[in-house]
Amino acid sequence: MKLQEYTSSSHNFEECMKCTVCTAYCPVLQVNPLYPGPKQAGPDGERLRLKDPFFFNYALKYCLNCKRCEVACPSGVKVADLIQAARIKYDNSPVKWRDRMLASTDFMGHLARPFAPVVNAVTGLGVTKTMMDAMFKIDRRRTFPSYSARSFEGWMGRHEKEQAAFPEQVAYFHGCYVNYNNPRLGKDLVKVLNALGVGVQLLEKEKCCGIAMITNGMKTEATKNANHNVKVLSKAVDKGLMVLTTSSTCTLTLRDEYPSLLAVDNSAVRDFVIMATRFIYERLEKGAELHFKPDFHKKVAYHTPCHMEKLGWGVFSEKMLRMIPGVEFTMLDSACCGIAGTYGFKRENYEASQAIGKQLFDQIKTVNPDVVACDCETCKWQIEMSTGYPVTNPISILAEAIETNKD
Amino acid sequence: MKFNTVIIGGGLAGLTAGISLQMAGKSTAIISEGQNALHFFSGSLESMEEAPQRVVDLFAQAGISLHYNPGYRLMPMGTFKKSTLSLEDISLFPETKIGNKALIVSFSGYHDFFCGFLQEGLEKQGVQCRVQLLSLPELEHLEKSPSEMRSVQIARTMDLVWENVVREIRILLRDEDTVILPQVFGLKDTSVLSRIRQGIPAQVVFTGTLPPSVPGIRTQMLLKRRYELLGGTYLMGDQATGAHIHDGSIHSIVTHNLGNHFMEAENFILASGSFFSKGLRSNPFEISEPVFGLDVEQADDRSDWYNPEFMREQPYMKYGVTTDASLHAIKGGEPIKNLFAIGSILGETRPELGTGGGLAIRSALEVADQILKQTAE
Amino acid sequence: MNNNEFDVIIIGGGITGAGTQRDCAMRGLRTLLIERSDIATGATGRNHGLLHSGARYAVNDPESAEECIKENMILRRIASHCVDETDGLFITLPEDDLAYQQTFVDACRKAGISAEIIDPELAKRLEPSVNPELTGAVRVPDGSVDPFRLCAANMLDAKLHGGQVRLHTTVTGFIREGDTIKGVHTRNLITGEERDFYAPVTVNAGGIWGHDIAALAGVNIGMFPAKGALLVFAHRVNNMVINRCRKPSNADILVPGDTVCIIGTTSTRIPFDECDNVSVTPDEVTLLITEGAKMTPSLSSTRILRAYAGVRPLVSADNDPSGRNISRGIVCLDHEERDGLKGFITITGGKLMTYRLMAEIATDAVCRKLAVQKACETADIPLPGSEEGSYEAVAQKIWEKPSTAQKAAAARMGSRASRIRTRDRLDEALICECEEVSVGEVKNAIERLDASTLTDLRRRTRIGMGTCQGEFCACRAAGLLAKAHGCIDKERDDLKEFLQERWKGNFPIGWGDTLREAEYTQWVYKHVLGL
């Protein structure tokens, strides 16, 4: 190799030109003066941290890992990765109980699901919210996602044979949210894929993707989940299956956060994990046909979740929705809703969270759609709570718009 | 995905081409590796000695009013620069004199606007100056952060509290005929600029700050919005990593985010900028174009790339990809039939098209016209 | 007593001059230091910043080696805020003769330098950036030292002991009565003011320029300018000093210093008239990267911030064209004894590492002339800033919950960082974002450390030394300087000079991200700001 031949730096943070563009797009910086901002927290801080970990700044915890700095960066610096990696490496403060609870979506869902009606009623109660606020610093103004009484995995178990009958198969990484809170979305995906002649199967026992663990400082637990998931994903990929997803955050985590933040090698499976909207759009583009309801009409405003923006795949959801006859489509300005997974649930972040999302909420109210479409479950909770407009995954909108033999 | 034209680069050149083609009903996509040089836009378009109505209209339809008024504008270092076509933020004067007495206003704790240099520069021109720093309670949250008393963050607040600034200035104003303010107004709402001008009983001159440029970000935002409203597909944060070339034409390009989902088109436009924007890449041995491996005009010996005097013209800045008469990009000495190069990736290889913003717009329009003409034939 | 009379005048604001002034001032002398430019502008600020253990000299120059290890231990004590105790490795690569290792270790031990042969596997764990193919490693007590900080601290201490410092002031001639130097004629290069100063003893501590100063006084010291080129990389690739375990040669030392690391050096004889304007050639750049990458492969793909060169002030002894076989030994010339010129002493040779010893020798000579008996205390009393231990402790003591910029200030200023603790929140705003330098720290350097230009500020605070090389901080700091000095017109020229000085170090390595950054900077200053 000739010296200095390919690029001047193999150290990504050195590609920062100090142009400050990232700071203009950081949603946290706009509302929280305690946060040093992506440039200081990322590439600038990295040089100092390499000198001595003493220069690590605990205020990096205010980064909500939305990755908008990375999308905006003209130099390709992985700003958010630098920040999250620094947190993983240097922040050795113990994980709070509250954060552990919020991060363990899988475990919590598993516990809560059998008692869903009770849990939902209780978490909705004023007294419970006050208690959670006082005990765990989970903001009382939050609406908690409700749990479904029956898990999606259970439903799939009952439809295994029928799905296996389709000549073409895909695997589905449904994530905790579909499993415990919204099995409807999973069923919608199955409906659409079946209509395209594709059968759906589960992975061999997936685990939570682990993003909430990563952002809450639970690296060991997250790595454990990552290793497990890569293993079960490999099994599916080895069988020649594509793995579809309906959550942009899970997708980004499986594809990009595993190698860059947890050093878990996913190279064998990465390219086979894609959002369902991409899969479906590609099918429709190649001429596959769906039977749309003739009288379907919906005014849809699409919100690009931060991690979808980072994946760069909002275009697939957009183009897929635009293909549905009767959809009146508006693209909302791409901006963070403020929830960032568990971030907005914490009492200390509530005000910031709502302030970050305000621009988006105002635009939704102006557009006044029938439904807001978006590929992220936590955005859904935030937008529904903050605007009152219903929020649905694009897959569910498509499912509603098509006719199948079963309907 | 299939388009009529795929454009690599979402800055001034790429957006101008994209908007022009969308307006003519062509489907296009723009791939933009992050934000672009518009974020450092000075507010005046270089080498625009005349103002084609078409350009003014194109910007006006996006909500950006350009005004043509050959003259001088006040630079942040207190100097004057010749300018013609500018954003409404920029005041242009027939001579290098802006008035008799000026009040220069900034914010305490704001280090990216240079009252001292402005004062000294203007006093040399015989303008009597007074500097006043405002301490607004609304900016206290920014003062708390050591790194964020910066143009965009201030501008966000100013969109909400500009009226307070006007009120303060009215109190401060004595017999000055001119008020000089940093360009931190009208980030989202351009009407703020004219409302400030109306509210202050003196001529108001908005002057540049250290980057990012507030008028530049606004321009980028409005052009992008216009492009998307026309149905254009703007892929922000994606990067063209390679191309499939058959028989001297580009068939499709590969991007980082879309992976094996290739972007196909009849035409491709390379508007990826110069070195900063990574349109051109350099190592100790050569300067190259990374996506297609196009021919780049350059001096062979690295020592000839630079002038040791910082402020002198730098040879490397003139280098660019080579093109034929109709701006087709050249690879291995042969033009690629459906690939055009526009904007600053041309360097100064096409001096007749000018430099900077003028080059971006002129080359973009020329290529858009050619694409439309081809299809018409 | 007139305010232009002193006991001793020291010419030269490098580390030798600053150290000599400190020593003289601590022995109760009234001192004046005159420097034609700024502190540490010569060889002092243009080397590796290596806190030599002496190991490098052990085989060929045992005397220097012994001096180094003694001074090394002293500097750890008295200059803790300037020193980074990293330790160092002497590695053997497959192309080197492993047998040299034993010769080397024996020589080190003889000189009193602890040198421990360690397993190459352990070396890789201790310093992961090292070439994994190494066949041998020796651990020695090398470290790094910030020459600017060290020089500023010595000068500050001299001032705290009543010394006066005149920077940007050149000696235009000597005041001579018969065979005695009585004082100097000077001119301030900024204001043009001409003044005479008187003292019974003048010390020439001008480094390589000491040759010209001596000539001005009518005596000849045969000096030998040897250029050494170095490269600064954009971050700390290594955390231990890495040396080649072989006969000293080109580009065989990589030193981590503050947020960067530095590879060097080369050695080329140059004529005297080039000393003021040395530049790095493309061949030297290639050599430094090629050789550097042999020790630390990742250097071949690490961003280079700048290239610079210094001139070693060697006293010529023979006609060796490389200059490498000349002892770096200390030369103190009493010109009364040597040339019959009274009241004039030259202190030269030596190296950054042994500055304190050089200062002690020179001050002893001064004291002999003045019949002053007081003993040297510079080896025992810490420099201002180094009184309170590690920067971690200092930062926490001053601020309780220090921000990154405050931690960085403590690392640069040591206990003197308490001077920038302020109630004014606006003073916490950052001027330099790469190195985290606040308004307060810049103000302190202007008010207390004699910084009058941007380049002066850079040496005292590290503004403009980071990745962007002064892209934004230069004009922010220029605003503060203009305000402090009330001289805006000059500040505009100062800004241009600063940017020119940065560019001088950038274009020899102008490719990749460095070229991108340069394009951006040139664009901002010319087109956006209108400089």
Image: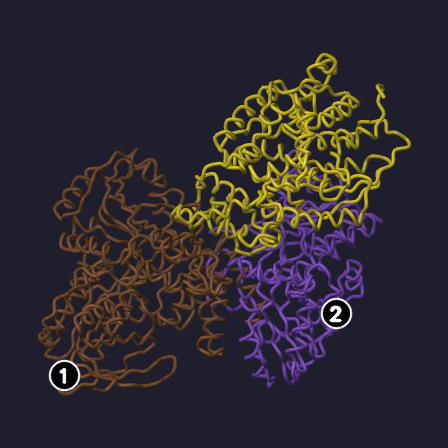
Chain colours: A yellow, B purple, C brown
Name the amino acid, label 1.
Thr
Indicate the position of residue B116 as horizontal and vertical percent values.
53, 75
Name the residue that disc number 2 marks: B195
Q: In which quarter of the image is residue C377?
A: bottom left
Q: Is mark 1 on a helix, strand or loop?
A: strand
Left or right: A54 as drawn, with respect to B78? left
Tell me the quarter of the image containing the C terminus of chain C.
Answer: bottom right
Left or right: B147 as drawn, with respect to A193? left
Judging from the image, mark 2 belongs to the subunit labelled B
Q: Nearer the viewer, residue C527 or B194?
A: B194
- Specify whether residue C238 is in view: yes
Left or right: B111 as drawn, with respect to C420? right
Left or right: A295 as drawn, with respect to A130? right
* Residue C163 vertical placement versus C317 (above, below): below
Name the amino acid, label 2.
Arg
Q: Nearer the viewer, residue C268 or C336?
A: C336
Tell me the quarter of the image containing the N terminus of chain C.
Answer: bottom left
Q: Nearer the viewer, mark 2 or mark 1?
A: 2
Q: Is mark 2 on a helix, strand or loop?
A: helix
* Residue A29 vertical placement versus A299 (above, below): below
Q: Residue sitting at 60 percent across and 43 percent down?
A: A66
For disc 2, the neighbor class at 10 Å (few under 14, some 14 to 19, many from 20) is: few
Judging from the image, mark 1 belongs to the subunit labelled C
Indicate the position of residue C476 as horizontal and vertical percent values.
50, 67
Name the residue that disc number 1 marks: C180
